[in-house]
């Protein structure tokens, strides 16, 4: 999805003016820590994993459960 052309003008990097920092400084520093929290052993809620390690749909798990169910029920 691209932005409408009237909102953002294209400015190639080779045509941009050099960045001028206050007091003639040459380097800017921005500290941005990335802090995430996951439960070590989360409570399991039904057939869906609340903390998936793979994006849904988890095709491999779904096929395994479906195949096992069909084997037990005789394919009905």
Image (cartoon, rainbow, N blue to C red):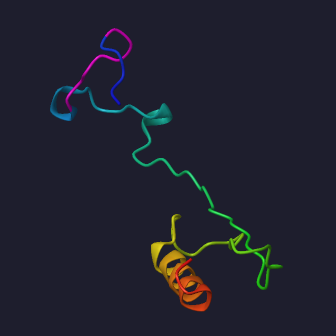
Residue at 53 percent across and 64 percent down: it is: 56
Query: In the rendered view, would you say 16 is above or below 45?
Result: above
Along the horizontal axis of the image, is 6 left or right of 14? right
Q: Quadrant of the N terminus?
A: top left
Residue 29 picture location, percent across and down: 52, 52
The residue nearer to you, when weighing 18 against 72, is: 72
Q: Quadrant of the C terminus?
A: bottom right
Query: In the rendered view, would you say 41 is above or below 38?
Result: below
Quarter of the image where one finds residue 26:
top left
The residue nearer to you, when weighing 61 against 32, is: 61
Residue at 55 percent across and 51 percent down: it is: 30
Decide whether the magenta segment is chiefly helix, strand or loop: loop
Farthest residue, direction left: 14
Residue at 25 percent across and 21 percent down: it is: 10
Along the horizontal axis of the image, is 15 left or right of 44? left
Numbered marks: total: 0
Query: In the rendered view, would you say 13 is above or below 29?
Result: above
Query: In the rendered view, would you say 76 is above or below 33?
Result: below
User: Which region is colored magenta?
Assistant: 6-12
Along the horizontal axis of the image, is 45 left or right of 32? right
The residue nearer to you, when weighing 70 against 50, is: 70
């Amino acid at each position: 999805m691209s932005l409408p052309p009237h909102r953002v003008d294209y400015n190639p990097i080779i045509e941009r003016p050099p960045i001028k920092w206050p007091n003639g400084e040459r380097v800017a520093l921005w500290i941005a820590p990335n802090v995430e929290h996951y439960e070590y052993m989360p409570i399991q809620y039904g057939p869906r994993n609340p903390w998936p390690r793979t994006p849904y749909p988890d095709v491999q798990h779904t096929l395994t459960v479906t195949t096992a169910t069909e084997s037990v029920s005789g394919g009905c």
